[in-house]
Structures are given as structure tokens and as C-alpha cells.
Amino acid sequence: MSKERMDYDSRKALVFEAANEMAEGGQTPSLEVIKQKVGGSYTTITRALREWRTEREKAQASQEAPPEAVSGLAARLASELWKVAQGEAQMGVAALRESLKVENQRLQQEMAEILRSAEGMESRITTFDSQMADMQAKLDLATKGKQEAETQAQILTSKLGNLEVRAEELKLELADAKALAAPSSLQEEIQSLRAQLVTLSDQNAIILATAPNRPKA
């Protein structure tokens, strides 16, 4: 046998060994991995790996078939197992359907409760908004009334101040009249001034009675 033939056989043996190890380990022998393990050219490894696959397929095909009795028993067992599996599957489907039905009913009840709660909440919100609008209207009216009352109070306070000033002026005029007027006309002047003071006092009382709150000095 020539040296080249021996070299190929040796390389093929290494390729077969590496391929068997990979197959037993659950891996698929590949050209790159085999080349890394045993070396050599791609042509040699490709040829050897092709022969390994051919021999492996022949070995698997030539395995002895099981006896007919064993095959029949296996077929019956497989059939029974299939029936059992089908029955369990149908039972499981029925149980699942029932569970889904119950869950669907529960979810529908919860949804109905949520909708009722939402409707009640909307009603309460509407009532609250109405109450808020009514309160705001009353507040606006009260604010307007307060502003008008404050304005009226300021007007009355101003009038009262003017009357007080006028009263002081009349008092001074009365004093001057007493000092300067003749006895014959003094009494008439005094009576006139007293009448004006009474009128001013009455006006002052009316203003004080109608003013809401007079600001403190």
C-alpha cells in the first residue's frame, strides 16, 4: 500500500474518531471543527467525513428490527396511551372552559359594579358642581353687597365729617355772635344757631343709624 494511501487511512481514522465523539456528545460533526481537531486539508477531511456519514447511515439502517410481538405490544400501548391522553386532554379542555366561564362571570360582575360606582360618582360630581356654582353665586353677591355697603359707609362718613365741621363752625359763629351782637339781636341769632345745631344733630343721628360700620378714627 502506498504512503499516500496510508496517510489518508490514518487521517480518516482520526476523522472517524473525532466525528464519533461529537455525535455521542449530541453535536453534529462539522468540517471546521473536525479540521481543528485532527488537522489536514479540507479535501481529505471532506472525503473522510462523507465516508463516516455513509457508514453511520448504513449501521443505523442495519439495526435489527424488534420482534413482531414487541412491535404489536408497543403499538397497542401507544394506542392506549393516545386514548388516555386524548381523554385527559378533553377533560382538561372541559375544565378549562368551565374555569374560563366562571372567571368571565366574575369579571362581568366586577365590571358591572365598577360601572355602577362610576355612575354614582358622576352623579355626586354633578351635585357637587351645582353646589359649588350656587356657593360661588352667593359669594359674588355677598362681595358685591359688601362693596356697596363699604361705599355707602364711606359716603355717610364723609357727610358726617362735613356736618361735624359745620357744627364746629356754627359753634364758633354762635360764640362770636354772643360777643359782638347787640342785646336786642343776640337772642335771635342764638335761637337761629341753636335751630341749625338741632338740625345738624338730627342729620348726624340719621347718618349714624344708617351707616353699617363707621371706620374708627
Image (spheres, grey):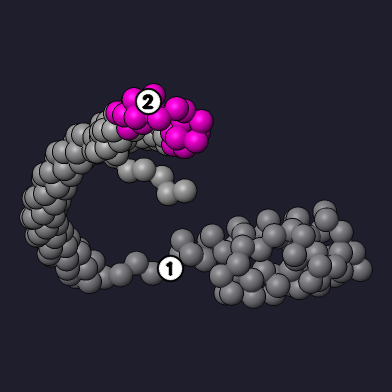
Q: Quadrant of residue 23?
A: bottom right
Do we see residue 193 in this rendering? no
Residue lying farthest to the right in this orientation: 3
User: Foreground mark, 2 or 1?
Assistant: 2
Which mark identifies residue 206?
none
| Number of on-image labels | 2
| 24, above or below 52, in the image | below
Mark 1 residue crowding within 10 angstroms, few (<14) / some (14–19) / many (20+): few
Q: In the visual, does 21 lie left or right of 69?
A: right
What residue is shown with label 1?
63
Q: Position of residue 83 (x, y in %)?
A: 12, 60
The amino acid type, in three-letter code, at marker 1 is: Gln
Give the camera-side residue of 169 and 87: 169
| Quadrant location of the N terminus in the rendered image | bottom right
What span is colored magenta in the figure? 170-196
Q: Is residue 191 magenta?
A: yes
Q: Residue 193 location, x and y as percent?
A: 36, 29
Check disc 2 and report the residue beneath it. Answer: 184
User: Mark 2: few, some, or many residues within 10 Å (few <14, many ≥20)?
Assistant: few
Q: Which residue is at a point 60% across and 67% down the rendered structure image?
A: 27
Which residue shows up at 66% across the image and 63% down it?
29
Q: Using residue 165 as the reference point, say whether residue 82 is left or right of it.
A: left
Disc 2 marks which amino acid?
Answer: Ser
The residue at the point 42 percent across, 49 percent down is 216
Q: Nearer the viewer, residue 156 or 42?
A: 156
Residue that appears at 48% across and 64% down: 60
